[in-house]
Amino acid sequence: MLRKIIFILLIGIATQFVFSSKGVSYGESLSSLEGRIKEVEAQNQELEIDIASFSSCHKISEKSLEAVYGLSMQSSNNFSVALKR
Amino acid sequence: MGCLCSLLTIFQLLLKDKMEKRVKFLIIFFLFSFSAILSKLFYWQIVKRKFLLALAVNQQTISYTIASSRGKIYSKDSFPLVLNQPSYLLFADPSLLKISTAELESLVKPIIQKGNFDNKLLSDKNLHWFPLAKNLTAETKNNIENLKIEGLGFEENTIRYYPEASMSAHLLGFVGEDEKSDPKGYFGLEGFYDYEIKGKFGSRTFEQDALGRPVALSEELVEKPIAGSNLLLHIDRPLQFLVEKRLKEGIEKYSALSGTVIVMNPGSGAILAMASFPGYSPSSYFNSDTELFRNPSISTSFEPGSIFKVIVMASALDSGTVNLNDTCTICYGPRTIGEYTIKTWNEKYYPSSSLTDILVHSDNVGMVYVAEKLGKEKMYDYLKNFGFGQITGIDLQGEVSPPLRSKNDWGDIDLATASFGQGIAVTPIQFLTAVSAIANKGELYEPQVVNKIFDDFRQVAISPVKKKRVISEQTAKILTQMMVEAVDRGESKWAKPGGYKIAGKTGTAQIPIAGHYDPQKTVASFVGFAPADNPGFVMLVSLNEPKSSPWGSETAAPLWFDIAKDIFKLGGVSPG
C-alpha cells in the first residue's frame, strides 16, 4: 500500500515538473517573441526613415543639382580643350 | 451579637452597593470606550475608506507612464512628411561613477558635441540621476556604450523626424511639451489634430517596498499605450516643394520682406500647397523666433488692394445693381468724397469704361462707381456671404479673422475705399476661399488640409464641406470672363504663359502705418485660377514690401505665372 502511495506521489511530482518546465519555456519563448517583434519594428522604423530621406524632394533636388554641376564641369572642361584646339 | 450582625449586614450591603456602582461604572466606561473605538473604526473604514485606500495604493505602488507612438503625417502621394524616430537621453548616476568629471567630459563630449558636465553635481555621491545630454541618435548611443563607462545610462523616447526638412513647417506645426512634460502639438496640423495624433498614453504599475524598490513577486499592472492616428493630406508634395522653391526665389528676386502662396482645388476646398517665408525648422523650433511659428496664410491679415475688386464686382453683378453692359459715368477723372479724393493708380482716366475695362485697367474710380451702385447694405451682406469677418474653418491651429466693420459703421468713404481693397483687412486663406467660389461656379467650399484620418483598425475620410452658394453660376461665368480679359489685356499680360486661358487679377495695396499709407511699402498680390473654364486650381501669391518694384503686376504676377507653369507641367496640362 505504502509503495503504491509513494509511486502515485512520484508520478504527481514528475507530472508537475513536466508541466511547470513547459510553462516556463513557453513564457520564455513568448518574451523572446515580443523582443523579436520590437526589434523588427525598430528595423522597419529605421528603414522607413532611410527610404523617406533618400527619396525626398529635398534630397532628389540636391542630387540633381550635384549631377548638373558635375556635367557642367565636364562640359566646360571639354569646351576649354576644344577652344585650345 | 445581634447588633454586630446587623452592622455587618449593613456594611455588606454598602459594599455590595459600592461594587455594583463600580461594576456599573466599569460597564459604562467599557461601553463608552467600545462605542468610541467603533465609531472611530466606522469613520476610518467607511467614511474615509476611499481616501485611505488611495493613500495606501499611492504608498504601496509605483506607476510609470508609457509614451504612445505619435501618428505620422503623409502627403497626397502617401509619402511621409512627419515620422517618428528614437531619441535618447544620456544620464549619469553620480553615486556609481568611478571616474572624475573631467575624465568623463574628455571621453563623452567628443562624441555628443554638447552636454552639461557640472562638476559640483556630478561629484555629489548622494545624487542618482543627472541628465548630461538629450536628443541623441542610436549611433551616438552605441558609441557611448562602447566606452563602457560605469554609471552612465540612457532613457529612450521618440522625436519627430521630417524627411523633407523644413518643407511645410507652417502647415505641419511642431511637437513640444505640455506642463507635465508630455509631448503636445502646437500650431498647424500638430496643434489642430493633437488629440487624434497623440494616441493614448499607457502605464506600468507595480508594488514597491518601503525603500521604493519593486517587490519581486508583486502583480504588475500594464496598460498598453494606444498609437495615435495618422493623417493623409491633400498636399501635393512635388507641388509644395516647387511652390516653396519658387517663393524663396521670388522673395530674393524682388527683394521682398516675406511672401505667401496658397494653392487650392476650388471644387473641393482641398489645399494642394501652402507656403510662407520666412519660416522655421520644426525639428529645431526652439532655436527660432516665436513670431515665425504663426502661419501667415491663416494668422496674418492684410489689406488686399485691387485683387479685392473681383469680389466687389461679383457682388454688384450678382445683386443686379449693375449689368455687364453698363458704362461708368464717373470715370472721367478723380472722384471726391467728403475731404478725400480718389484717383486711379496711374492717374489715367477712361471715361465711359465698361465694367470689364474697369477690371482690366484696375480703375479705382470705376470701382467706386460699382460700389456706389451696390450700396453699403448689400456690400456688407455679400462680404459676409463670401466669408469675410469670420474664420474659414480650415483644419489648422491658429486661424484668425480680422473683424468686418459692422453694418451701421460703413461711411461713404469706407464703401469707396473697400471697393478697391483698402480700409478692409482679410487673411490670405479668407480671400482665396472667396475667390475659389467664383472659380467654382458660385459655390463656396471650406478649405481642408486633411483628406483622411487612419490607423491600423479604422479609416475616417473627411468629405469636402460645401458651405453655400454665394453668387449665381451666371455671375461666376461673367466674372471669370472678365478676369480672363484682365489677364490678357491687363498690366501683367507680359508675364502670362502663352496658350493657357487664365483668369486673374493683380493687386497692389499700400500698407497702413501709424494712421496713414506709406506709398513705398506695398503688399503686391496676384490671385487667379486656371484653366479658366474648368479650373484645376486657384492660387494666391502675396509678396510683402517688394523693393525691386512695388507693383503686383511686376512681382507677384510673374511669380504666379511661374508657379502656374509648374502646375501645368505636373498635371500634364498642355496649352490650348
Image (tube, coloured by chain):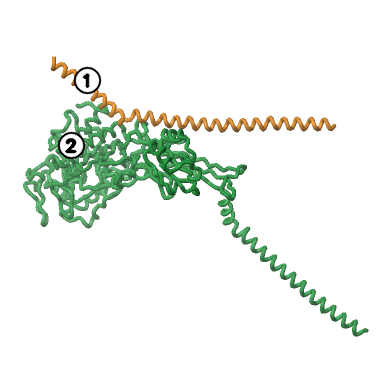
Chain colours: A orange, B green
- The secondary element bearing badge 1 is classed as helix
| Residue placed most toward the observer, B246 or B552 | B246
Give the residue at x 7% y 45%: B347
Along the horizontal axis of the image, is B349 left or right of A60? left
Residue drawn at point x = 22 percent, y = 26 percent: B574
| Residue at the extreme bottom of the image, as rendered | B3
* Chain letter of the residue beneath label 1 in the structure image: A
Q: Chain of mark 2?
A: B
Q: Farthest right residue?
A: B1
Mark 1 Cα within 10 Å, few/some/many (few <14, many 20+)? few
Q: Is residue B11 left or right of residue A24?
A: right
Q: Is A35 situated left or right of B90 in this image? A: right
The CA distance from mark 2 to mark 1 is 29 Å
The vertical placement of B496 against B48, above or below, is: above
| Residue matched to label 1 | A74
Q: Nearer the viewer, mark 2 or mark 1?
A: 1
Whether labels 2 and 1 share one chain: no
The image quadrant of residue B80 is: top left
Q: Answer above or below: position of B23 versus B156.
A: below
Mark drawn on residue A47: none
Q: Amino acid at mark 2?
A: Lys
* Residue B437 in sight: no
| Residue type, numbered disc 1 | Gln
Label number found at residue B253? 2
**In what element is the residue under mark 2?**
helix
